[in-house]
């Protein structure tokens, strides 16, 4: 029994769990959705995310940075264009200790004006790699973000009925629900404030270095659907490993350098397939690149399907380092407890299938060659071409 208060709290908060009795650590994540932000709001949410670990009413910046040292992992905030994720780890048995800090970060962040000025300056000066720019191509102007903007965005986004809590590790029955109830049952957030309408963020179109990039941005994958598994599997055929289309066509035949990969990207609407092609040199023709990829798909054989299934099985079971699934913008998914928890939490966040990675891999078994090729072609044909030209 989790108790009446805990049960009532679960009517407000969404939760997700990954039970791992043998883990020496426990991890808690909080997801804060930030959908459909304007250009100014998106820049503000990024500044806000960077300020969360700089101090709260109950904890100093130093205390926050030292938290989790025994678990070997300090608190981390990940910013994405449409959500923010906070992750805190502690030794097994430390769930309530984690929630004490999580409560402070979510409910009482300092959001100090001096910190905001420094973060704004740091973000404006940070140098991103061409790959990082391709992954998150939104152009954000941090110079106009004010302390009042940050506090207003905080009040609008950080609300009990919007946050998802996830916990992983050696957890007892009902332990997560009780922790959420203890620390958040009395949270009464401020009302929404009126905000000025703004324009959506623009996408980067050129960069001051010789690397050009082209992306084929596919439609969001809605599940369950007839093409869901086939399209995910097709991404392995298109852009994972040396036998994939992108490597063979762009690197071996055309002699491109730099990086060409398939990425399966998390959004609040669901997984979004992306083919990202970078090369040193002039702008890449979307028409010629799309035709080259479609022509290669026509040449796929049963061997191509077998290879894609084998690679997907290995990647989703953690036996292969090349994995197209990303859970934030830091790196592809691994088999760590934090990433396994993020996988499960993300499925709950987007109301998607709560399949484990290995279970998702099992759905690929029924995909035949015709479906495999058809899904790949449909993804490429329906995709939007996004180019960033080098100089």
Image: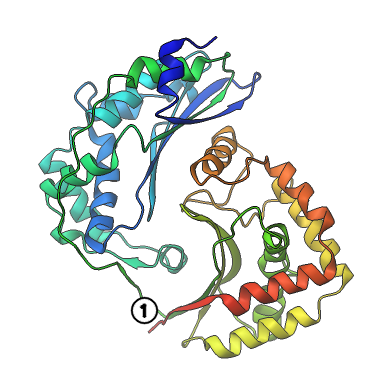
- Looking at this view, is 8 or 122 the one in front? 8
Place of residue 114 in the rendered image (x, y in percent of width and height, measured from the top left): 11, 42
| Callout 1 secondary element | loop
Place of residue 230 in the rendered image (x, y in percent of width and height, measured from the top left): 73, 62
Place of residue 107 in the rendered image (x, y in percent of width and height, measured from the top left): 25, 28
Q: Quadrant of the N terminus?
A: top right
Place of residue 78 in the rendered image (x, y in percent of width and height, measured from the top left): 40, 45
Give the quarter of the image for residue 155. Answer: top left
**Does the rendering let one see residue 79?**
no
Q: Which residue is mark 1?
A: 205
- Looking at this view, is 219 or 343 the one in front? 219
Q: Residue at x 35, y 74 (%)?
A: 204
Residue farthest toward the right in the current orientation of the protein: 302
Q: Residue at x 64, y 88 (%)?
A: 291
Q: Residue at x 43, y 69 (%)?
A: 130
Image vertical order of residue 211 relative to residue 139, above or below = below
Relative to 307, 56 lies left or right: left
Image vertical order of residue 169 relative to residue 3, above or below = below
Image vertical order of residue 319 relative to residue 212, above or below = above
Give the quarter of the image for residue 6. Answer: top left
Q: Residue at x 76, y 73 (%)?
A: 373
Q: Quadrant of the C terminus?
A: bottom left
Q: How many marks?
A: 1
- Looking at this view, is 78 or 282 the one in front? 78
- Looking at this view, is 187 or 210 the one in front? 187
Relative to 103, 234 lies left or right: right
């Amino acid at each position: 029994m989790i108790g009446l208060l805990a049960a009532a709290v679960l009517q407000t908060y969404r939760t997700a769990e990954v039970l791992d009795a043998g883990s020496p650590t426990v991890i808690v994540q909080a997801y804060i959705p930030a959908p459909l932000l304007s250009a100014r709001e998106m820049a503000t949410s990024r500044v806000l995310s960077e300020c969360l670990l700089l101090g709260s009413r109950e904890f100093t910046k130093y205390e926050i940075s030292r938290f989790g040292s025994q678990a070997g992992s300090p608190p981390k905030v990940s910013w994405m264009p449409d959500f923010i994720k906070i992750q805190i780890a502690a030794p097994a048995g430390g769930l309530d200790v984690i929630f004490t800090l999580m409560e402070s970060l979510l409910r009482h962040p300092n959001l100090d004006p001096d910190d905001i000025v420094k973060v704004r300056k740091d973000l404006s000066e940070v140098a991103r790699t061409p790959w990082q720019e391709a992954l998150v191509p939104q152009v954000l102007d941090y110079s106009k973000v004010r302390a009042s903007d940050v506090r207003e965005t905080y009040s609008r986004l950080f609300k009990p009925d919007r946050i998802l809590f996830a916990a992983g590790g050696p957890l007892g029955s009902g332990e997560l629900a009780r922790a959420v109830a203890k620390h958040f049952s009395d949270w009464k957030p401020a009302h929404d404030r009126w905000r000025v309408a703004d324009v959506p963020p623009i996408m980067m179109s050129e960069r001051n270095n010789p690397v050009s990039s082209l992306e084929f941005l596919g439609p969001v994958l809605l599940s369950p659907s007839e093409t869901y598994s086939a399209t995910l599997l097709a991404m392995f055929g298109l852009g994972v490993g040396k036998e994939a289309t992108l490597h063979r066509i762009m690197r071996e035949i055309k002699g491109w350098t730099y990086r060409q990969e398939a990425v399966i990207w998390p959004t609040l609407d669901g997984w979004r397939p992306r083919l990202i092609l970078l090369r040193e040199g002039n702008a890449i023709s979307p028409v010629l690149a799309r035709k080259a990829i479609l022509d290669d798909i026509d040449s796929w054989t049963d061997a191509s399907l077998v290879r894609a299934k084998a690679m997907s099985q290995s990647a989703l079971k953690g036996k292969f380092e090349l994995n197209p699934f990303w859970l934030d913008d830091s790196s592809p998914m691994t088999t760590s407890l934090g990433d396994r928890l993020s996988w499960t939490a993300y499925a709950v966040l987007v109301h998607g299938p709560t399949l484990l990675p290995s279970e998702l891999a099992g759905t690929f078994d029924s995909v035949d060659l015709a479906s495999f090729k058809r899904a790949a072609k449909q993804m490429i044909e329906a995709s939007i071409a996004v180019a960033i030209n080098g100089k």
